[in-house]
Amino acid sequence: MRFLVLGAAGQLGAAIVERLSNSGTVTAMTRHDLDITRESDVVRAVAKARPDAIVNCSAYNQVDQAEEHAPQALDVNAFGVLALARAARENGAVIVHYSTDFVFDGETDRPYIETDSPSPQSNYGLSKLLGEWFAADAPRHYVLRVESLFGGPLAKSSVDRIVGAIRRGESTPVFVDRTVTPSYVVDVAETTARLLETGAPVGTYHCVNTGITTWLGVALEAARLIGREPNLLPTSVASVSMPAKRPKYCALSNEKLLGVGIRMPAWQDALARHVASSG
């Protein structure tokens, strides 16, 4: 297969490029190579690469900054996706686009499933929801909702910062009341490849590791794996002033993936692999 990967310099993009290189020919493009908000450039890039699959890892992911810079977030997370979806449709390619738990409001007590009604509470969440809808402009599309990404060749997420702080013996604040399902980029990349290789039914999937935890739970497990007593600063969401509202209960169910034969490893297993590989 021929793959065109956008946002290849990011944490997820780098992992996607690494994995898909084992399955075919990859054309990897960073935001400096291609500005997906310029539709004419997108048309030319897709026509030149002639991909079987377009994998979009580009994103405006500055959650708080999106509150003041909504047009920029919409350009990348929504209208850029529409340009890619149209190019995919015109060239007979499948598109893979990654979304987020922030499309939900977090006012629940059980993991969200794909058919739950979105209700974004921030400009970032709204821009990502529009991107989901625009990705569906391509008949063959996968929208993969990920959450709390970590690991991979460019580890730089909240999980990675917590692991680093524990290793250095530094104090680190952790939310005690945000319920999450972390996503290891290595596992997300593997699942992406399997969906494309097996031709699984198109549509929206929650692509997260299995199990539910809090940021405090992640930190305690990381400390156990590292073998150090952590210096954690338990924090509540309400005690931190942030421009963008965060969903408190944002766990996602990955049962739909299991229904097409893809079992995501437990988040503890994913974290253990990450700690071992980054030590």
Image (cartoon, rainbow, N blue to C red):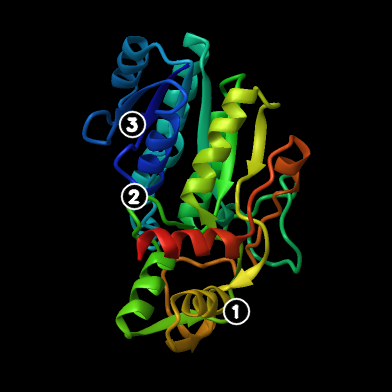
Q: Amino acid at mark 1?
A: Asp
Q: Amino acid at mark 2?
A: Pro
Mark 3 and mark 2 residues within 8 Å of each other at the beta carbon: no
Q: Which residue is mark 3?
A: 37
| Residue depicted at x 66% and y 31% | 203
Graded by Cα atoms within 10 Å as few (under 14), some (14 to 19) or many (20 or more), the crowding at tag 3 reads many
Q: 149 or 127, which lies in front?
A: 149
Give how far across and how far down residue 268 sits, in percent: 59, 65
Q: Which residue is mark 2?
A: 153
Mark 3 and mark 1 residues within 8 Å of each other at the beta carbon: no
Task: Indicate left or right for 272 with 66 as reference.
Answer: right
Residues under labels 3 and 2: Cα distance?
Answer: 26 Å
Task: Indicate left or right for 59 with 40 as reference.
Answer: right
Give how far across and how far down residue 245 sits, in percent: 51, 67
Task: Indicate left or right for 231 with 30 as reference.
Answer: right
Mark 1 or mark 2, which has the lower sequence index? 2
Graded by Cα atoms within 10 Å as few (under 14), some (14 to 19) or many (20 or more), the crowding at tag 1 reads some
Mark sitting on residue 32: none
Q: Secondary structure at mark 2?
A: loop
Q: Secondary structure at mark 3?
A: loop
Q: Which residue is mark 1?
A: 177
Q: 134 or 198, which lies in front?
A: 198
| Residue depicted at x 54% and y 32% | 193
Give how far across and how far down residue 118 sits, in percent: 66, 50
Q: Mark 1, mark 2: which one is toward the viewer? A: 2
Mark 3 or mark 2, which has the lower sequence index? 3
Q: Quadrant of residue 228?
A: bottom left
Residues under labels 1 and 2: Cα distance?
Answer: 29 Å
Look at the picture and state if 169 lies above or below 11: below
| Residue depicted at x 51% and y 63% | 271
Mark 3 or mark 1, which has the lower sequence index? 3
